[in-house]
Amino acid sequence: MIDPDRLANPGEGWVSREVYWDPAVYEAELERIFARCWLFVAHESQLPNPGDFLTTRMGQDGVIVTRRRDGQLAAYLNSCPHRGNKVCHAEAGNARGFVCNYHGWSFGLDGRLLGMWQQSTFEKSAGYDAGTLGLVPVAQIESYKGLVFATFDPLAPPLDEYLGDFRWYLDVLLDNDDGGTEFLPGCIRSVLHCNWKVAAENFAGDALHAGWTHDSGARAMLGQGLKGDIDPSSSYSINVNGHCWEFALDMVGNAATFGDRTVARYIRNRAEDVEARLGKLRARMIGAASSVNVFPNFSFLPGQNSFRVWFPRGPQETELHTWVLVNRRHPPEIKEAYRRGAMLTFSPSGLFEMDDGENWEQTTLVNAGVVTRRQKLWFGLGQGTRVAHDEFPGNVFQGQINDANQRAFYRRWAQLLGADTWADVKGDPGTDQQ
Amino acid sequence: MERHLVVCPLAELAPGEMRRVDPPENAPILVCNLNGELWAVDDTCTHSRASLSEGELEGDEVFCPVHWGKFHVPTGRAMGFPAEQDLRTWPVGVQDEMIVVELGEG
C-alpha cells in the first residue's frame, strides 16, 4: 500500500503532485475511498415509483439503482454474475427487471436471479444454485432528506454518522421548505482530462479562484468583476469529516451570476420564512457566494443549485454528471429560472464552467513531466484562522479565501488511505486542524 | 367423454386476478378474470418454461416473470419477443358459482 504521509502533509500545508498522477495512488483510492465511503447515487425524486431505475457509478463500479416492488431503494453492480456483461445499458427508465443481453439471465427488481435461456440445463448442473447467483447488492443504501447514498463497505458507519454535523449545513438547501426538494429532469454529462481531486478540492474550498479565473464571466453576468481583498469577517470555511463548505453570508452572491434577477429576488422574498425555519445565519447561505464538496466526490453550488458527481475514470480523467436541485414547491417559473441559469453558468457550455476546465486539465497533465511531478504544491493559505463559533458546528475557519477546507479534504483522504478498515478510521481528522 | 376441470368458486378470483390449475392429464392452465370476463390459456410460457401465473397481469395481457415476454389473454397471441409462439386457449365458464374449464374429449 502507498504511504499517504509521503504524499500529503496538510498540517504543514503541502500536497505532492503525484496524487494527481501515480496509478498506484489511484488504485489505492478506488480500494480505500470509493469502495469504502458513502457515495451519492441518486435523488429520490428520480425514482418515485416501483420499477424506476437509473444507472450510475460508484467510483469506477457501474451500478443499477432501483425502487423495488416493496418501495425500498436498492442498488446492484451492473454486471451479470454469469459472464460479467453489463446488464442494463439504459441511463434511466422503468422496468419489470433486468435481462442480460449475452445469455438471457434475468433478474428481478430485488436482484434475484429469476431464470435464463436453457434454464433446465442449468438446473441439471451439479452445484447450480439460483439463490446465490443474483445481482451483487451494495452493502448499505440510505437517504438523507432526498439524497440517496450507498456504500460497498458493510463496516462503514451509518450515513448519519458519516455526514455528522454536516447535515446541519446540508439542510440549508435540503430542508428550507416543507415540501422538500427534487432534481429537475435530465442529466448533463461531460468529460474532463483532470484528476477527480482537482475538481473536488476546488468545490471544497477554492473561493480564491472565483475572482480571478471567473473574472470575465462575472463582468458579463454581474456587470462588474469580483472585488479584490474581500473582508474575511463575514465569510467562513467549515468542514466536518472531510466534507467542506466555503461561504459568504450574502444570501444571493451565487444566484446573482444568473444575470436575470428572478431567482435572487425570489430568495430575498422568502428570506423571512427561511429564517423562521433555519435561523438567520443559514437563511443567508441559501444562494450565497459559496461551494460545497461532500467527501469524496459529490459537489454542489448553492445559488446556482448545480449538483454534481466527479466520477473517476483513471488518474487523468473525470466524467462529470450534473443535475439541478429545486424545492418541490417552487413555482414553475422559478424552476425554469434555475434550469436556465444553471445551463448558462455551470454546464459544459456555461460561462463559468468553461473557465475551469482548461485550468484543471493543465493542473493534471503537466505532471507527465517526471521532474514536474516530484514538486510539492503549497496549500498553506489561511493557516491559523480557526475560530470558535456559537452557532456553526464542525471545524470553523474565518474567511472563505482560505485553503483550510482543501487541507481538511486531504486530511480525510490521507486518513482513509492509511486505514486498513473503517475500525482504523478514528474520528474527524479536522478536529486538530489550525 | 367430456372432461371438466373445476377451478375454484367464482368469488375467489376477483377482476384483475389470475390463478394456475394443474389438471391431472394436461399441462398447467392459467385462468384470468379480466374485468369480470373469464379466460383460460396454457400457463407455461412458450418461450421457455416459466409459469405465467408467477408473472404480471396488466389489462388483457400477461407478462412472463422471467424475460417479460407478453401474451394477449383472450386470444393467447404472443405479443413480443421473446414470446413468439401463441398460447393454447381453453373454453371456460361458470357452473353453480364455480369456475370450470372445458378440457374437451378425454
Image: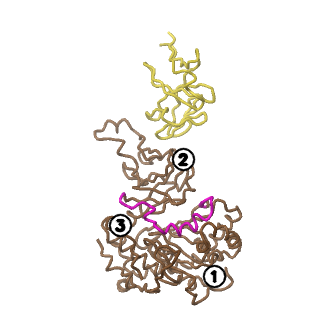
Chain colours: A brown, B yellow
Numbered label attached to residue A252: none
Q: Is A323 colored magenta in this rendering?
A: no
Mark 1 lies on residue: A218
**Residue furthest bottom as drawn:** A229
> Badge 2 sits on which subunit?
A
Q: Nearer the viewer, residue A52 or A240?
A: A240
Mark 2 lies on residue: A50
Marks 3/2: CA–CA distance: 33 Å
Which residues, given as a range, are shown in magenta? A154-183
Q: Disc 3 or 2, which lies upstream in sequence?
A: 3
- What is the three-letter code of the residue carrying label 2? Pro
Q: Is residue A303 visible?
A: no
- Residue drawn at point x = 41 percent, y = 52 percent: A137
Q: Nearer the viewer, residue A412 or A297?
A: A412
Q: Position of residue A398 (x, y in %)?
A: 51, 83
> Badge 3 sits on which subunit?
A
Mark 3 lies on residue: A32
Q: Are marks 3 and 2 in contact (CB under 8 Å)?
A: no
Q: Position of residue A161 (x, y in %)?
A: 43, 64
Q: Quadrant of the C terminus of chain A?
A: bottom left
